[in-house]
Amino acid sequence: MMSAAVAKRLPTLLRATKSPFIAFQLHRTSSSLSIQQSNNALSHHITHKSPQHSQHRLSSSSPIDITVTKSNNNNSESNNNSSNSNKSHDQITEESILALQSELRTHHRCANYTSALSTASILLEKTTSHFGILHPATASAYNNLGLMNKCLGQYTEAKEAYEESLRIYGEVCGKDHGSYAAALSNLGMLERSRVMEVDDDDNGNNTDEEEDDTKEKLTTLDKLQLNESSIEYFDEAYRIRLAELGPTHPHTISSRSQLGSAMAYAVIMERRNKLLSSNSSGLIENELRSMKHALSVESEEEMEKHVPLAVARAASKSMEGTSRLSLRRWDAAEEHLRGALRSAVENPRGESVGRPLEYLPNDGNVASSIGAGKGKKDRSLPKKDRRKAAKEAKREQRANNALLQSDTTGDESSHNLIAIQGAAAKVSTLSAATAAQNLAVFLKNYSDWLQLTLMDRASKIETLPEEEQPKEKDRQEQQMMELTVNVKEARHLYEAALHVRSQLLPPHHPDVVATKFSLAELLDVPKEGAVAGMGIGVEANSVRANALREEILAAYNVEERDVDATAASN
């Protein structure tokens, strides 16, 4: 079991991944984070023709591969055996660009962003010198520079680079081209990252007081404007990709899911601002003052036990006071999120695990990816650690396979397994995993608000006239059923996303960590407060939740230390 000391340090450790773990994080798709992508699909083919004749595609956020097409190269074997003295200046320069690209990918894959930024700067200088400013290769080099600055939290520099990449693609390729859409998507993700990181700190996840002075300070209005800006970027990118690539392309699916997440977060921010406002309009403050007066409470300590109910009542009023425009935006967000997932699972493209998750574990003793195959090797680990990890994975795989095989002839409940249902049962690609994660976050957030509303209604039922109480109980039962369905669907989606990501990505990858963290939060149903004793049919699974958190700590090689003993030794 994880100690309280380690659990307290977890948010700080997670923040180092640059992936905020609160509602509606924009989880990047395989097209934007996969470092080892196919050159055929995502490379630039560079010749000495003018930029207008260059045919190219790029990924939306990963370091761009540049495939150099050498002219007059009819005998590759003989050219490979040639000495550098027989190569032209252009050939030597282009090969050095390829070498820098390889170095950049390695640094990015190992999360060595400082070195990656240095390499990206050199790459930009060489590309600009060799191809000129108005060239797709130069635009991709600016994209790389923006990505590395973003990974380091240098958002101003990242935006300048991304905007230059957008400008070049707009002039060279046109504003209806997929590369222009990718640059728009990058800008949208950048704006969302700024909002989410600041929001993460506002929620108390930043425990490093020394970092506070260096963090970007944003007002509520700043965050709203940044999120609206991201919606505009995602919407334009989605429309371009829909027209050029069609609705089933992974990039189109990515843009649609991103758009839905940003739209939903705008509504969440509106409700949360009503709750947390420190002035007289803050709903929580108003409820606390009202309850303190009604209950004649004098002590602040005594008042603390009434805070959960005050929050529940404030949340209920916040939902009731949601504007029609916000409700329409919320519905549109859900439509985009479900549509993206549906397209992703019905048209699987890209890297796949082959076999989707069939069952989910119902306790902490069953591995999270039952039926999992062999994942990618984490090349950033030492060989000794890779061999050890491979042996453990094989041992776990044999146990899981035996469990599944025995389940085919026995009672499902006897093995504590639950079949995955709905679209989650078809998630097999990274694109689908991202769409599943985003929809799961949406459902989890809605469930949180629904739980608070139920708590408020349960506290008021005895104050109603006796003849109205049966109808109110029926309404509560319907809400509890809706809550159960939403939470269960969210869990299935999280589990399916984790099944795919844990096999295709290394354990320290931000997307893997994000899914484990979100799933752990969902499994840790509180035993008091909003859902206490309400029988919603979703039991807490703290054992599994803590196991997931331990996996996150293990991915970063975090060791638990006795703080008192360390201080004494010093």
Image (cartoon, rainbow, N blue to C red):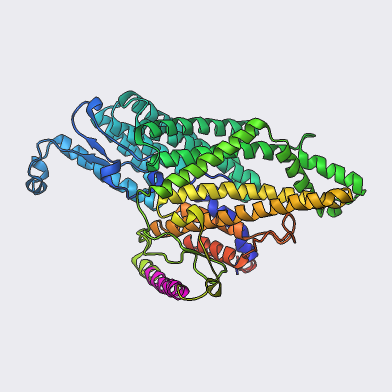
Q: Residue furthest top?
A: 171
Residue 5 in the image: x percent, y percent?
63, 63
Where is the N terminus found, in terms of image quarters?
bottom right
Q: Residue at x 49, y 55 (%)?
A: 424
- Asked whether the viewer can see residue 479, the reply is yes
Residue nearer the viewer, 185 or 466: 466
Q: Is residue 560 left or right of residue 112?
A: right
Residue 112 in the image: x percent, y percent?
40, 50
Residue nearer the viewer, 395 or 550: 395
* In the image, residue 271 lies in the stretch drawn in magenta: no
Magenta residues? 390-407
Q: Residue furthest right?
A: 296
Picture quadrant of residue 50: top left
Q: Is residue 13 left or right of residue 166?
A: right
Give the answer, above or below, for where 311 lies relative to 377. Answer: above
* In the image, residue 403 lies in the stretch drawn in magenta: yes
Q: Residue at x 56, y 34 (%)?
A: 227
